Amino acid sequence: MTENNAIAMEAAEAAAPKGAPRTAPAAKREVAKQEKKGFGVQDLILVAVLLAAGAVLKLTLGTLLGAFGMKPNFIIAAYCLAIILIRPNLAQSAAIGLIAGLVCQIPMLNATPLLNIPSELLGALVCGALIHVPLKIGGKLDLNPLVTTFLSTCVSGLAFAALSSYINVISVGGDFFVALAAYVAIVLGTATFNCIFVQVLALPLQKVLKR
C-alpha cells in the first residue's frame, strides 16, 4: 500500500458516518468488552488473595488492635477492596459477599456462627451498587472507595448487630433497640477504620493492576 493510499484510507475512516462499520481493531476491542461478563481467572485469584489476606490480618493485627479498644474488620475491607478493583455486577458482588461470609465461619474468625453470611452478603451488595457512583474531587481524587467502604461496612455491621441482638437479647426478654444501640459506636468505628484502610490501598492497587 502506497503512502497516498494509506492517507486516503485514514481520511475515509475519519469522514465515515457514525453508523458505518468500524475498523477491525475497534471491532475487536468492542467484542472483548462484550465477552467479559463473568469472573476472569485473574479476578478470582484477586478475590481469593484479598480475602485470605483479610482473614490473616483479622487474626493478627485485628486481635492486637482489639486489645486497644479498636474493632477493625479486615474481611469487610478485603471484599470491598476486591469489588472496587474488579467492578463486578450486583450478582457477582453478592457472590463475593457470600464467599466472605463463608470464610468468616472459620471458628477463629467468628464467635457467632452463620450471622456473617447475610451481613456480608448485604454489605457486598451495597458496595457493588455504590462503585458506579462518581465521587471524584477536582477530576483527580476519587473518594468512591472511602464512601463506598464506609457505607458498606455500616450496612454489614448493623445487619450483624440486628441479627445478633434479636437472637441473644429478644430470646431472653431484653430490649432490642437498647442492645442494637450498644453496637452503633463499634460499627461506626469499624467503618471509619475500614474506609481509610481501603482508600489508601485502592488508588495504588488500581495503578499497579491497571484497573
Image (cartoon, helix red, strand yellow):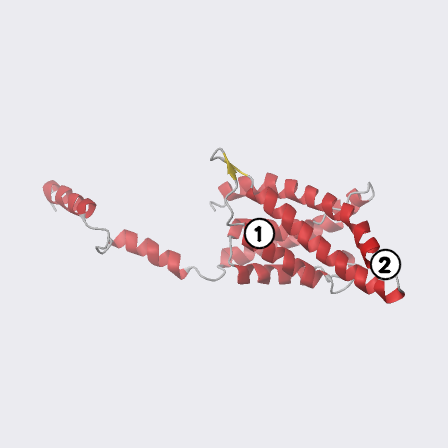
What mark, if any, has residue 30 been given in the picture?
none
Residue for point 55% across, 56% down = 45
- Frontmost of labels 1 and 2 is 2
User: Label 2: which residue?
Assistant: 175
Q: Earlier in the sequence, mark 1 or mark 2?
A: 1
Q: Nearer the viewer, residue 149 or 23?
A: 149
Q: Residues within 10 Å of mark 1 (few under 14, many from 20)?
A: many
User: Label 1: which residue?
Assistant: 82
Q: Residues within 10 Å of mark 2 (few under 14, many from 20)?
A: few
Tag 1 secondary structure: helix
Please state the horizontal and vertical placement of residue 58, each as a whole percent of the image: 73, 50
Please state the horizontal and vertical placement of residue 168, each as a whole percent of the image: 84, 62
Q: Nearer the viewer, residue 192 or 9?
A: 192
As shown in the figure, which amino acid type bears the numbered disc 1? Answer: Ala
Residue 68 quadrant = top right
Q: Mark 1 and mark 2 in contact? Answer it, CB < 8 Å.
A: no
User: Does residue 165 show up?
Assistant: yes
Residue 171 quadrant = bottom right
Please state the horizontal and vertical placement of residue 128, each as a whole percent of the image: 56, 55
As shown in the figure, which amino acid type bears the numbered disc 2? Answer: Asp
**144 lies left or right of 117:** left
Residue for point 82% across, 50% down = 182
Please state the horizontal and vertical placement of residue 149, each as a whole percent of the image: 62, 47
Q: Nearer the viewer, residue 68 or 165?
A: 165
Q: Nearer the viewer, residue 52 or 18?
A: 18
Q: Is residue 40 above or below residue 69?
A: below
Disc 1 to disc 2, C-alpha distance: 37 Å
Residue for point 56% across, 43% down = 202
**146 lies left or right of 176:** left
Tag 2 secondary structure: loop
User: Does residue 54 show up?
Assistant: no
Residue for point 69% across, 59% down = 119
